[in-house]
Image (tube, rainbow, N blue to C red):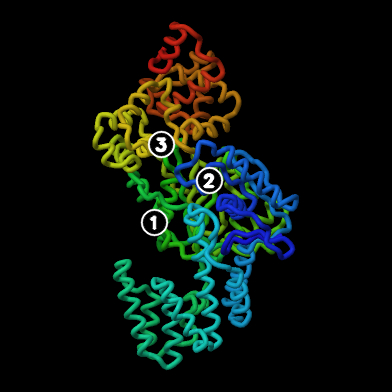
Amino acid sequence: MEFRVLGPVEVRRDGHRVAFSGAKLHTVLAALLLARDEVVSDERLCRLLWGWAPPATVSAQLYTYISRLRKILGDEVMIDRRPPGYAMSIGNATVDLNEFEKLALGGREALIKEDFERAGELLRDALARWNGQPFANATEYLADAEAPRLTEARAVTLEHRIAADLALGRHEQITGELTGLVAEFPLRERIRCQLMTALCRSGRQADAIHLYHHGRAVLADELGVNPGEELQATYRALLDGTLDRWQGAAPAVRAGARPRPSGPSAAAPAMLPPDTVDFTGRGAELDLVCRALTPDAQGAGRPRRVLVTGMAGLGKTALAVHAAHRCQRHFPDGQLYADLRAADGTPRHPARVLRRLLRALGPMDDVPANDDQDQLVRLYRERTRGRQLLIVLDNASGAAQLGPLLPNTPEPAVLVTGRTALPTVAGAHTVALAPLAPRDSLELLAAAAGPARVAAAPCAASAIVEHCAGLPLALRIVGTRIAARPHCTPDRLARRLADPLTRLRELHSGDLDVHTSLLPSWRALEPEVRAVFPALAALGAQPFPAAEAATELDLPEAEAERLLEALADAALLEVSGADEWGQPCYLFHPLVRLFALSLEEGRAPVPGGPAGRAEHNRRLTHRP
């Protein structure tokens, strides 16, 4: 069986096209293929099918599409339900995208070795896998999300194939093709360089000079920038008559240095999630992270390790991804990203993460089929050695998980996020996030909800900021809900948040949920720590020492302090100064305290009648 996504989404069996119709069915199939055996959540499928306006019958329709696919594909393909979504295993079937990536990578490696005939053959074979616009018969939501990266990969492969042709002296044969490509991609400077090279070698220097000035004008008009280093170098070489056979290839190939191609499975991976468009606040923390990641001549030879810590919902991932995008130019060999937490909140096994990173770093031919972790670690460290990479490891759970994922040479920089300090990241710059200040909270709320909506209801906005207690996740949830209801004022939502009994239930929007974000931290606790967590919340909203916790729990003070420290290590408690005797005091974040009390409520429902309700309210708002 053969699957195709580099053009219309198709299934072929024994060389014949399998007939099935419907943009949504093609979308579900393409999403599962692109995940490469990973789980695609119901939420993501919903977005790819219906955008931001899903129908009320989402679950039923998803089930119908999956059932139809199972019937169409038969026993050769397995589609499993793995909460919170579905995963597909295609067995011995092929996917044109995988073949394209493998051939393109082989072609680039041949180009580096100056085996130009072999490089041209492989790269042409890779491009032959294309059959039109990717996902042409799927939904626009899938095309918008996935087609740009594939189109970029095709363009890069074209550039490398043309570099091979130029090196073989085929400039006259490809001049017409390059002219069309410059018209198709007027902002791609490398293709313009290649056409200038071909024109120069064909004795058309005047046309090559005109092409440079035209490109300079296009870049200025469209982007407001000057030509890049490669285009300027090509122009200088054209003027002084030194435009040699290497011009038009990748600069790294010409210099004999490590290649820096881009695109899926290339030597220069680009795995970072999209940047947060409305990133707000955290200016000081962002500067700390960026300075720690930036190469420093005085610190040459020292590993660059940065650890961002804080409780769930404080925006660790948003900060890390924003900083990584900001520092991209310092990492020409690419950026790797891995979420170390699965969709259900459990830690991912290091071997599975390593396989994903190795797939981005190069061919999988020498990667063991089984999860031999020692072998995977060896390959991973070989492929990262000496390369200017930025590796972002998100949601690390502990040393056992993180250790195998750290390179053993200083060139790659590593940015880790986790709830607390991790001893594995020795010598790391640690940036501990605190809740946002009220001013930054209001700015984030305005960015998510719309400045006009917040400005029109200043009292409600202030109340919302107070109830969210500086937690970026909570503020973004509320802002999203306000933005989604243009005819409702924020006042009603502010009133609903004012009630501690319902506040956590209100802090939910789509796949964003404060209660759900805190659950992995609680589940990771030792059973004895988990058991006392709700009882400690009854101590109230003010700081308390271990002695007071010991009284509440009926435990020795030393034992109570051990449990409190475990909660602080899990970022479910804050250490807040000391009491008059110099003993450390502990403090619940307001929303974490409501979360703890909700766990107690889940085990033992609030007694009926006014007395029971009054006691529950007292626990929420007062210290006993």
**Disc 3 packing (10 Å; few <14; some 14–19; many ≥20):** many
**Which sits in the foreground, 567 or 36?**
36
Relative image position of residue 441 (x, y in whole percent): 32, 37
Residue 329 in view here: yes
Residue corresponding to mark 3: 477
Give, as a three-letter code, the residue at label 1: Arg
How far apart are the alpha carbons under marks 2 and 3? 18 Å
Give, as a three-letter code, the residue at label 2: Arg
Residue corresponding to mark 1: 326
Q: Residue furthest bottom?
A: 203
How far apart are the alpha carbons under marks 2 and 1? 27 Å
Between circles 2 and 3, the one closer to the viewer is 2
Q: Secondary structure at mark 1?
A: helix
Q: Secondary structure at mark 3?
A: helix
Q: Which label's residue is closer to the chain start, 2 or 3?
A: 2
Residue corresponding to mark 2: 44
Task: Decide if residue 420 is on the left or right side of residue 472.
Answer: right
Residue 478 lies in quadrant: top left
| Residue 10 versus residue 246 in the image, above or below | above
